[in-house]
Image (cartoon, rainbow, N blue to C red):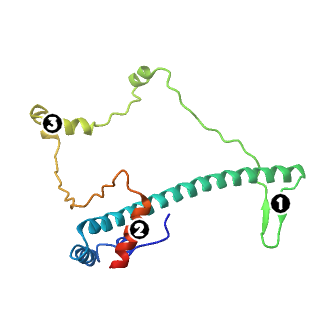
C-alpha cells in the first residue's frame, strides 16, 4: 500500500454527513480551477482509486489477522491440552505462582451430543410432527398477478415503501493504466493545487 496521501484522498477519508457541503465546495474548486478537464477527471477518479486500494488493503489485512487469530486459538487449545497432559504425567493437578495465582488442571469429561437422522419422514408427519409456515415469497409473487391478488388480497396487507438512492459517480479504470502514471499525475495535481 502506498504511504503517500493526497489532499482530496484525505478529505474523502474524513467525509461524513455533517461536512458534505464543505467537500462539495472542494470538488467545485477542482472543477473551477484552470487545469485541463482530463487532469481534473484523473485527479478525482484517481483519488477514488486510492480509497479503493486502502479498502482492499485493509480487507486483506483483516483476513490475514482473522486467519492468524484462528491459528493462535488452535495453537493455544493444543498447548493447554499438552500442558495438562504433562502435568498429569507428574501427578500434578495444581501449580501456584507469584505473578499467576495458579494453574489448575480441569478434569477430562465426556460430552454427549445427540444427532437425529430421520428414517421415515412420512410416518412422522402422519403422527403430527410437522411444522407449517407461510410462504411469503409465493404470496408476494401472487400479489403481482390479478388472479393471485384476488385470491390472497383479503388475507394480507401490502405496504409499499420508497427508498431514495442519491446519484453517485463510478470511477472507470482504463485497462492499461499504469500505477506509476497515476502516482505521478496525483503528485502533479497536488503540487499544482
Q: Are marks 3 and 2 in contact (CB under 8 Å)?
A: no
178 lies above or below 151: below
Q: Is residue 47 left or right of residue 142?
A: right
- Res. 184 mark: 2
Q: Is residue 129 visible?
A: yes
* Label 3: how many Cα within 10 Å (few below 14, some 14–19, many 20+): some
Give the image location of residue 13, x and y in percent.
Answer: 38, 71
Q: Earlier in the sequence, mark 1 or mark 2?
A: 1
Q: Nearer the viewer, mark 3 or mark 2?
A: 2
Query: Which part of the image, by quadrant, shows the C terminus?
Result: bottom left
> Depth check: 160 or 54 in front?
54
* Label 1: how many Cα within 10 Å (few below 14, some 14–19, many 20+): some
**What SS does tag 2 mark?**
helix
* Label 2: how many Cα within 10 Å (few below 14, some 14–19, many 20+): few
> Depth check: 177 or 130 in front?
177
Give the image location of residue 137, x and y in percent.
Answer: 26, 38
Which residue carries the number 3 mark? 152
Q: Is residue 18 left or right of residue 100?
A: left
117 lies above or below 75: above
Q: CA distance from mark 3 to mark 2?
A: 64 Å
Q: Are marks 1 and 2 in contact (CB under 8 Å)?
A: no
User: Residue, x 83% and y 60% (percent of image)?
Assistant: 94
Which residue carries the number 1 mark? 94
User: Residue, x 41% and y 29% (percent of image)?
Assistant: 129
Give the image location of residue 164, x and y in percent.
Answer: 19, 59
> Depth check: 182 or 92 in front?
182
Give the image location of residue 113, x and y in percent.
Answer: 61, 38
Q: Is residue 14 visible?
A: no
Q: Earlier in the sequence, mark 3 or mark 2?
A: 3
**What SS does tag 3 mark?**
helix
Amino acid at each position: 500500500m502506498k504511504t503517500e496521501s493526497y489532499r482530496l484522498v484525505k478529505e474523502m477519508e474524513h467525509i461524513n454527513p455533517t461536512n458534505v457541503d464543505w467537500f462539495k465546495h472542494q470538488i467545485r474548486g477542482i472543477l473551477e480551477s484552470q487545469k485541463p478537464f482530463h487532469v481534473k477527471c484523473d485527479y478525482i477518479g484517481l483519488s477514488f482509486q486510492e480509497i479503493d486500494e486502502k479498502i482492499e488493503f485493509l480487507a486483506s489485512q483483516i483476513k490475514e489477522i482473522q486467519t492468524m487469530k484462528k491459528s493462535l486459538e488452535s495453537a493455544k487449545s493444543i498447548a493447554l491440552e499438552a500442558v495438562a497432559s504433562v502435568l498429569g504425567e507428574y501427578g500434578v493437578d495444581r501449580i501456584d505462582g507469584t505473578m499467576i495465582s495458579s494453574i489448575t488442571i480441569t478434569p477430562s469429561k465426556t460430552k454427549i451430543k445427540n444427532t437425529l437422522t430421520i428414517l421415515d419422514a412420512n410416518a412422522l408427519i402422519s403422527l403430527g410432527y410437522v411444522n407449517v409456515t407461510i410462504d411469503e415469497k409465493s404470496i408476494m409473487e401472487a400479489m403481482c398477478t390479478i388472479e393471485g391478488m384476488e385470491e390472497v388480497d383479503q388475507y394480507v396487507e401490502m405496504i409499499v415503501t420508497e427508498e431514495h438512492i442519491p446519484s453517485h459517480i463510478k470511477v472507470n479504470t482504463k485497462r492499461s493504466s499504469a500505477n506509476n502514471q497515476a502516482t505521478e499525475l496525483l503528485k502533479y495535481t497536488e503540487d499544482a493545487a
